[in-house]
Image (tube, rainbow, N blue to C red):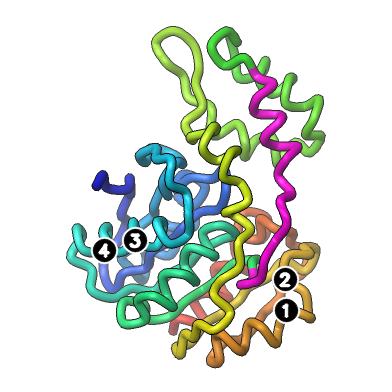
Amino acid sequence: MPQLNYKTFGEGQPLIILHGLFGSLDNWVTLGKKFAENFKVVLVDQRNHGQSFHDPVFTYDAMAEDLCQLMGALNISTAHVIGHSMGGKTAMEFAVKYPEKVDKLIVADIGPKFYPVHHTQIIKAFYTVPVESIKSRKEADDIIGNLVSDFGTRQFLLKNLSRTSDGFKWKMNLDTISSRIEEVGKALNQNAVFNKETLFLRGGNSDYVSNDDFNLIHSIFPKSKVETIEGAGHWLHAEKPLDFYQSVIQFLS
């Protein structure tokens, strides 16, 4: 089984960070270095993302197994785990499967419920870029701009563009992600329980975690609390990094 790509910073108690859909560990380097003042931080590229391996299997079960294997390879017996969005779902899956390996769990702007597919426009935008023939990132940005108007979102998506000897390519496994996109929205097993301290952080401007989700969250994560980062959307760690950092540090201390 191939191993996930990762980067480590700092030393001390391990803190593993999992990015969201279309993301990579690169999105977390700045915050990761800040957390590394207190922890041994492990930033991870999940399968089919960043520099990690491509595989036609794209399920939370498989992604939880990937994390288990990586921890084994790094001789990490237990860790705090942070997961954002899709990474939050992986982190939840991992926690209910391997509770003995998780110290504290932090889930950023995602709940354990089912989410309908809502990335169709972004996937379409990726496919409109003729990556083999474009000459610059600017060209890709202009093409994606026809379908994705928000500049910040485009900057985030274009981090997946990688230069090759004869042009560009997408780092992520676009074909597998697009054909298995329903997997990303799947709910956690509603009968699962994780009995350790858990923090759900949500963006005040995001609709991913609503007050109606609290009962389900507390039924699976009885020792959980939900905090809101005001003025932040779904990418709360990028929009309000200091608030995010302080909430996490307070929870972990």
Residue linked to disc 3: 65
Marks 1 and 4: in contact by CB < 8 Å?
no
Disc 2 to disc 3, how far (Cα)? 26 Å
> For the residues carrying marks 2 and 3, which lies nearer the camera in this image?
3
**Secondary structure at numbered mark 3:** helix
Q: Is residue 1 visible?
A: yes
Q: Residue at x 77, y 74 (%)?
A: 210
Earlier sequence position, callout 4 versus callout 2:
4
The tag on residue 209 is 2
Is residue 203 part of the magenta span, yes or no?
no
Earlier sequence position, callout 2 versus callout 3:
3
Earlier sequence position, callout 1 versus callout 3:
3
Q: Residue at x 27, y 47 (%)?
A: 3
Region of the chain picked out in magenta, as a range? 111-129
Q: Amino acid at mark 2?
A: Val
> For the residues carrying marks 3 and 4, which lies nearer the camera in this image?
3
Disc 1 to disc 3, how far (Cα)? 27 Å
Pinpoint residue 201: horizontal percent, then vertical percent. 63, 73
Q: Amino acid at mark 3?
A: Glu
